[in-house]
Amino acid sequence: MNSSATSDLYRDILDFAHTTPTWFQHLAELWTEAGLLLFGLLFITVWWSDRTKGSRAVALALLAPLATAIAYACSELTKSFLTEDRPCRAVAGAAAPLVTCPPVGDWSFPSNHSTIGAAAAIALVICRPLLAWLTVPMAVLMAFSRVFVGVHYPHDVAVGLVLGGVVATLVMLAAVRPVQGLVEAMRTSRSGLALLLAGPGEGAGGGHRRARARARTGA
């Protein structure tokens, strides 16, 4: 899959990486993993805050991590078929990577981190459009960091971003209606776990407040 153009761009980015301060190089290395953790925290935050909303909002919040996992599976399956070696071994004359080059068999195309980042970003935007200003830059920076530290070609991360975004969008839109029906059923269940996942539903807080008000007035 690699071409002279992407190999040259890889060399240029890695040469630039070696000119940056050591603290910045460590920050780029950290971000490739910390970004995944932050996306996980956003999944939890959106789901928890949406539990008091309508069943569609909860369905989307529950689907977001699932869509991301499916995108990752698609990326991993593609890797196993294409078996492109990492640029840190394959590109002649390139500077040393900033991190240890992954072993043979841990293939390069597409980038799993980029796929996961894009899938998580788009899934969260579908849940909360205003999050686009945060999640999309996070995904792009995560993708760039994989080239910056020297373990991916530029085309690995570009395709990973597209793959993750497309798969997440398709999964979220295709599955929202059946999952919405499941959420509505879970809200009538006696199972504590089902009620925890689905939440009390829209207007539940107001209903509780009205019940307390009636109790105080004796109505």
Image: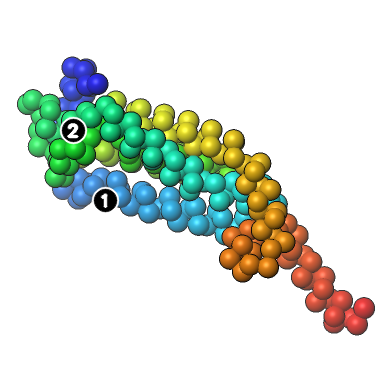
Which residue reaches farthest top?
Answer: 4
- Mark 2 belongs to which amino acid? Arg
Left or right of 212, for residue 173:
left
Mark 1 and mark 2 residues within 8 Å of each other at the beta carbon: no
Determine which residue is flagged by label 1.
Answer: 30
Q: Residue at x 12, y 28 (%)?
A: 90
Left or right of 88, for residue 154:
right
Q: Residue at x 33, y 37 (%)?
A: 76
Above or below, 209 relative to 160: below
Horizontal and vertical percent position of residue 136: 45, 38
Horizontal and vertical percent position of residue 59: 61, 48
Determine which residue is flagged by label 2.
Answer: 86
What separation in Å lies between label 1 and label 2 (alpha carbons)?
A: 20 Å
Task: Determine crowd level at label 1: few under 14, some 14-19, many 20+ residues with C-alpha closer than 10 A.
Answer: few
Task: Determine crowd level at label 2: few under 14, some 14-19, many 20+ residues with C-alpha closer than 10 A.
Answer: many
Whether residue 87 is visible, yes or no, is yes
Above or below, 207 relative to 155: below
- First in sequence, mark 1 or 2: give its number: 1
Left or right of 44, for residue 28:
left
* Quarter occupied by residue 71: top left
